[in-house]
Image: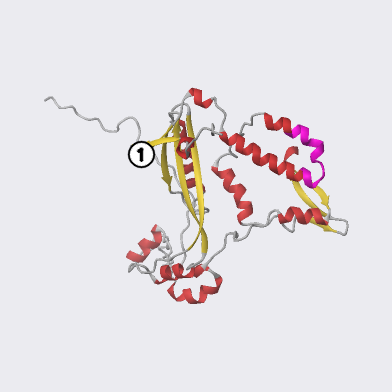
């Protein structure tokens, strides 16, 4: 029997058509330009610098033409750090810092930015990403319902949800840079809950204070069981190889004695002298010293107002006949 199935190549299934003049052209006539972006490391910029970076991104997006798509891809590759100790201009502290992190695992971050210009008709089409989200999310929902023995009860509802198109929803940003830094600062320098917030610990549970943001951030008291309290506390524990901000290498407490001889001494700041002290030092004359007893000092009792000259002239001026 003759095979009547159509043969298709892998190239025919790819959405890309060609790469011309450093631009990616798709089969649907979409043009994409790719850039490699170098971003600063995490927690190395101040609030003002973060605000400047955020505003520059916002201005750049606003000048894009209509029906443009911005896609940012971040790649994290697990590598081992290789120090650069062969440079001649490196100091002793820099070379020690590089050797401290030798062969240590880290995530090498690479950022790519893709700008795509499409058409109005293409924007109305359904995104393929919505189908991917639908399959991934429904798979997790079915797994959870199966563990709770509730899958037959919701199977009909899941089948109806699968038939409908999904729309990816992106929430608006949290706010400006100061709000983001303030939010992240609670997790980089603090623990999940301080001792001052814990009111009482009993066998029945743990009582602690919290802020109810739905009720004008009022301070309220609540009580949770020990298991629930530990579960919420463990949600704030950092994952493996993630640590809070601390000092490494030559800045650690262990290396203080070795680095102390190389520390730069602070220059002694001279005390700022007043104008009268400077005059006394240069001329040897103190105008506040009493001219009669040569021991006591004169003090200002009252300042007389400055007298202006009268409007009328006391002497007449003779005009010349020239």
Observer-nearest of 11 and 186: 11
Q: With respect to residue 122, does 240 lie above or below?
A: below
Q: Quadrant of the N terminus?
A: top right
Residue shown at 65% from the left, 41% from the top: 136
x and y percentages locating residue 69 in the rendered image? 48, 33
Residue 231: quarter of image: bottom right
Q: Which residue is outermost to the left?
A: 322
Residue 265: quarter of image: bottom left
Observer-nearest of 40 and 169: 169
Secondary structure of the residue carrying tag 1 is: loop
Q: What stretch is highlighted in magenta?
A: 145-158
Residue shown at 48% from the left, 76% from the top: 258
Mark 1 burial class by Cα count in 10 Å: few <14, some 14-19, many 20+? few
x and y percentages locating residue 222 in the rendered image? 82, 48
Q: Can residue 10 be seen in this view?
A: yes
x and y percentages locating residue 250 in the rendered image? 49, 70
Residue shown at 36% from the left, 66% from the top: 281
């Amino acid at each position: 029997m003759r095979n009547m199935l159509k043969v298709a190549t892998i190239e025919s299934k790819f959405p890309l058509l060609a790469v011309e003049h450093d631009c990616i052209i798709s089969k649907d006539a979409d043009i994409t330009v790719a850039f490699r972006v170098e971003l600063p490391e995490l927690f190395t910029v101040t609030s003002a610098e973060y605000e400047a970076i955020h505003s520059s991104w916002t201005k750049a997006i606003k000048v894009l033409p209509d029906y443009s798509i911005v896609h940012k891809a971040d790649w994290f590759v697990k590598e081992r750090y290789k120090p650069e100790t062969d440079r001649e201009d490196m100091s002793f502290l820099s070379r020690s810092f590089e050797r401290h992190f030798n062969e240590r695992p880290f995530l090498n971050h690479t950022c790519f930015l893709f700008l795509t210009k499409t058409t109005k008709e293409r924007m109305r089409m359904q995104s393929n990403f919505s189908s991917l989200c639908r399959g991934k999310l429904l798979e997790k929902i079915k797994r959870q319902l199966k563990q709770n023995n509730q899958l037959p009860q919701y199977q009909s509802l899941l089948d109806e949800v699968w038939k409908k198109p999904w729309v990816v929803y992106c929430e608006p940003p949290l706010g400006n840079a100061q709000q983001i830094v303030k939010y992240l600062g609670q997790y980089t320098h603090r623990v999940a809950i301080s001792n001052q917030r814990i009111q009482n610990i009993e066998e029945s549970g743990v009582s602690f204070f919290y802020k109810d943001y739905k009720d004008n951030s009022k301070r309220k008291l609540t009580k949770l069981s020990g298991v629930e309290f530990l579960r919420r506390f463990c949600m704030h524990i950092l994952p493996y190889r993630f640590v809070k901000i601390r000092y490494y290498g030559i800045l650690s407490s262990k290396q203080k004695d070795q680095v102390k001889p190389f520390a730069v001494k602070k220059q002694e700041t001279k005390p700022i002298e007043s104008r009268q002290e400077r005059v006394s030092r240069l001329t040897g004359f103190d105008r506040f010293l009493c001219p009669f007893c040569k021991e006591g000092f004169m003090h200002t009792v009252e300042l007389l107002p400055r007298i202006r000259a009268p409007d009328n002239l006391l002497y007449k001026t003779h005009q010349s006949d020239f």
